[in-house]
Image: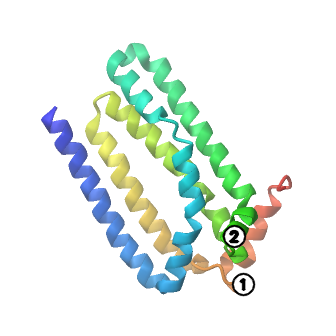
Amino acid sequence: MASATIILSASQLLSALVAVVFSILVARLLGPGGYGLVNLALVYPSLLAGLLDLGIGTVVSRYAAANGVDGLGHVWSGVVLKLLLGLIGSLIVFLYADFFAGLLMRPDLAPLLSTLSLYVFAGAALSAVSSAYVGFGRYALAGSVSLALSTLRGVFAVALILAGLGGVRRGSLLYNRLYPAVSALSPIIP
């Protein structure tokens, strides 16, 4: 049990260090104003991700640990429910991006909010998979999933910024190309 705690703690520490390094890099690339806008835009996706958790990750870990292979059906049900809730949350943020941007009194953040809607689904997926791995005693895998997500999130953030997608200005590629294209795919936007 002590080795499990050490493995999970070390992986969380490494994930945090990777996140700090990429946060500094992203802040340097975007500048104070751009970085502040990204953090402001993350308010509603983060809030929704937290509200949609419903403790399902804890239940998945508990059933996996208590029942092992016999509880696999419950574990899969929990993982699928968590993914479904993440998808619903992601769709809510995407479809109501204009509304949330209005609540923040920054209508120019709607394209960024639409892009950040994936944050809700990614968080749900990470939580579901990590909970299952922890419950089944696969601590190194649970830790590596967390570390991989932190690394990929940082690499993609830097790549998107360097590709010209780092802003919500009217001249940015995100505003002019991606937002209208993605919005056109969802004709049910209220």
Q: In the image, 117: left or right of 180?
A: left
Q: Is residue 22 above or below residue 70?
A: below
Q: Is residue 53 above or below residue 68?
A: below
Q: In the image, 42: left or right of 100?
A: left
The span from disc 1 to disc 2 (Cα, nearest Å) is 10 Å
Q: Secondary structure at mark 1?
A: loop
Q: Secondary structure at mark 2?
A: helix
The residue under the point 69% across, 68% down is 101
In the image, 173 versus 41, the foreground residue is: 41
Q: In the image, 166: left or right of 10?
A: right
In the orientation shown, which residue stands out farthest toward the top?
70
Which of the image's four quarters has the C terminus?
Answer: bottom right
Mark 2, residue position: 111
The residue under the point 33% across, 69% down is 20
Q: x, y (%) of residue 172?
A: 66, 82
Q: x, y (%) of residue 64?
A: 38, 23
| Residue type at the position of mark 2 | Pro
